[in-house]
Image: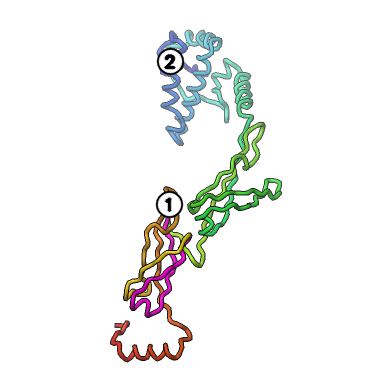
Amino acid sequence: MIFKDYYKILGLQTNKVSQAEIKTAYREQAKKYHPDVNISNQKYEERFKDINEAYRVLSDSISKRKYDRMWHRNVGKANATYEESKRSKDSLFSDFFNMFFGNAEEKNVLKGKAKKNTAVRGENVETEINISIEDAFRGKEQTIGVRTVEGKLKKFKVQVPAGIQNNEKIRIVGQGKQGKAGGKNGDLFIRVKIKNDEKFTLSGYDLKTNLYLTPWEAALSTKVVINGINEDVSVYVPAGIQSGEKIEIENKGYKDGKGGRGKLILDTKIMIPKNPAEEVLELFKKMDELSKFNPRK
């Protein structure tokens, strides 16, 4: 059996050290060889286990005295150098430790860990709801149903805050899966999906909608009033505007969460009447005779 020099494992050259020095040495070595710092390095992982094993022995006055008797007999010999520990699968301690200190110590450690970790927090649960742009803008109380582990439908009233962002989550504390052995329940997270409709499309903080114009309004310029998301908006349409051109109105879009708002973007669409009166048709014919405009050139 290879003798394990616990002092050397902690970077100490002698056993004439105080508990404070052992603790400091342990922290330095544990930081250096911690698995989180050396990901996927099996050698470092085993070294980290040896560091913990060495500290457990040397930080206890009784086990330290027992070890020191062996240390005095073995230090200075060829077999007193550090070698990677042999340990059974998932064992906390090496074969060397179990030979001199017994498996009972490992069982006590595992038992102590089990007692410490009996309270297990429940898992979080996530679901989602769909909401219209206007309801999201104004805020709305909504009832949702969530299936429990037992398959029962549990209903909650959720207050969707005004101006919530698309894919933002609402958290309901303690309504996730039940904790174990006194552990706290998990939380319920509700992802809010804001759905576009026939009137508005949400793009970031901007709202997009269509602006329908007659040919003469587009040609002559006009002022129209459209329905915004929370108020009527007066819009000036310049003469000669083309179908597909955009008009942007600042601070009339969706809420940005900082007290401001995005833009209201109007997509111009020039509409022709399907069944115009005879007089209107005559005017169109007259325009056709007078105008030299050809949109295909």
Q: Please state the horizontal and vertical placement of residue 4, each as a whole percent of the image.
A: 49, 18
Classify mark 1: helix, strand or loop. Answer: loop
Which residue is at the front of the view, 189 or 2? 189
Circle 1 Cα neighbour tier, 10 Å, few/some/many (<14 / 14–19 / ≥20): some
What's the residue at 50%, 62% (across, down)?
196
Q: Horizontal placement of 137 versus 180: left or right?
A: left
In this picture, residue 111 sits left or right of residue 74: right
Quadrant of image for the C terminus: bottom left
Q: Quadrant of residue 203?
A: bottom left
Q: Amino acid at mark 2?
A: Ala
Residue occupying the point 61% across, 39% down: 174
**Residue that carries the numbered disc 1 in the rendered image:** 256
- Residue 208 among those drawn in magenta: yes
The percent position of residue 288, horizontal first and vertical second, equals 34, 89
| 2 or 1: tag closer to the N-terminus | 2
Q: Secondary structure at mark 2?
A: helix
Q: In this figure, which residue is indicated by the disc labeled 2?
A: 78
- Name the residue type under label 1: Asp
